Image: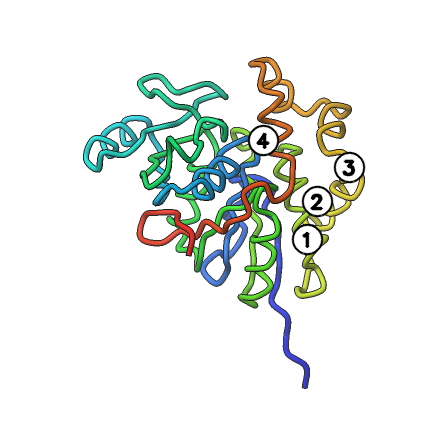
């Protein structure tokens, strides 16, 4: 008798998370531009851990308590009251090594908190920069998966959907996928995989234009490139750390 495969679903927006049973699933938090890309990068560059919080005030308060580096953005810019934003290039090893990063963002940290509130069985963060680590882990764990796109203020975006499609294209044979949003994400990825930056540009992705307006082309290109920070951030006891 063959082993039953676990299921895989894609939630394209936090506004849809209530439709999914996360209590028996690993939830992959996806916020390509730029929270989950920066989380993987900071940990790859030696950060002890990343503590995601859902407000600027909580970020500042906790940073003082633990002597951590406080960082965050709102609408793509450094949040008022914080010194650092969520660009992956702000966290080289000589700055972040052996330190704790306390991070709040517009979309990604909010979705993580929502998954926690719904008693997710497990939570990891995923981005193109750690694509292989995410895929290897999901196959190894043999558990149900929900790919959770942080989107942009509850509106579906291209880059998070593209990443969901990239994951699915690599690991689909290991899962049962009866989910139109997963099929859509995979089809989207296959149409753009040869040059994701150009795909975002040609299709006038909203977040592409938002960040390009701030002169952040380098960030976008990095965040769309596979395995530049190939570690696996796992959420446990309030922290994201590499196991």
Report the mark closest to the observer, 4 or 3: 3
- Tell me the SS state at disc 3: helix
State the residue in front, 233 or 22. Answer: 233
- Tell me the SS state at disc 4: loop
Q: CA distance from mark 1 to mark 2?
A: 8 Å
Q: Are marks 1 and 2 in contact (CB under 8 Å)?
A: yes
Query: Seen in the image, is 144 located left or right of residue 2?
Result: left
Q: Residue at x 68, y 86 (%)?
A: 1
Q: Are marks 4 and 2 in contact (CB under 8 Å)?
A: no
Q: CA distance from mark 4 to mark 2?
A: 15 Å
First in sequence: mark 4 vs mark 2: 4
Read off the residue under disc 3: 192
Q: CA distance from mark 4 to mark 3?
A: 20 Å
Read off the residue under disc 2: 185
The numbered mark at residue 168 is 1
Query: Seen in the image, is 8 located left or right of residue 97?
Result: right
Compared with 66, 56 (above or below) is: above
Residue 188 placement (x, y as % from top left): 75, 40
Q: How many residues crowd mark 1 within 10 Å: few (<14), some (14–19), many (20+)?
A: many
State the residue in front, 214 or 187. Answer: 214
- Tell me the SS state at disc 2: helix
Report the mark closest to the observer, 1 or 2: 1
First in sequence: mark 4 vs mark 3: 4
Report the mark closest to the observer, 4 or 2: 2
Read off the residue under disc 4: 155
First in sequence: mark 3 vs mark 2: 2
């Amino acid at each position: 008798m063959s082993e039953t495969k676990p299921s895989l679903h894609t939630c394209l927006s936090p506004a849809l998370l209530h439709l999914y049973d996360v209590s028996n699933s690993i939830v992959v938090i996806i916020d390509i531009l730029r929270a989950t890309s920066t989380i993987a990068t900071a940990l790859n560059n030696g950060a002890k851990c990343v503590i995601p919080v859902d407000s600027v005030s909580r970020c500042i308060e906790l940073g003082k308590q633990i002597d951590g580096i406080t960082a965050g953005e709102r609408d793509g810019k450094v949040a008022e009251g914080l010194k650092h934003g969520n660009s992956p290039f702000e966290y080289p090893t000589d700055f972040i090594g052996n330190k704790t990063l306390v991070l709040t963002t517009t979309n990604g940290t909010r979705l993580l908190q929502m998954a926690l509130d719904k008693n997710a069985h497990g939570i990891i963060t995923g981005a193109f920069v750690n694509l292989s680590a995410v895929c290897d882990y999901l196959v190894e764990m043999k558990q149900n998966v929900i790919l959770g796109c942080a989107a942009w203020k509850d509106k579906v975006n291209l880059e998070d959907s593209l990443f969901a499609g990239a994951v699915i294209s690599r690991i689909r044979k290991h899962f049962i996928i009866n989910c139109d949003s997963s099929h859509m994400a995979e089809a989207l990825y296959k149409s753009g995989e040869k040059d994701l930056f150009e795909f975002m540009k040609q299709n006038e992705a909203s977040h592409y234009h938002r960040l390009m307006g701030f002169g952040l082309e380098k960030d976008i290109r990095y965040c769309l490139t596979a395995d530049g920070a190939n570690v696996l951030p796992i959420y446990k006891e309030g922290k994201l750390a590499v196991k």
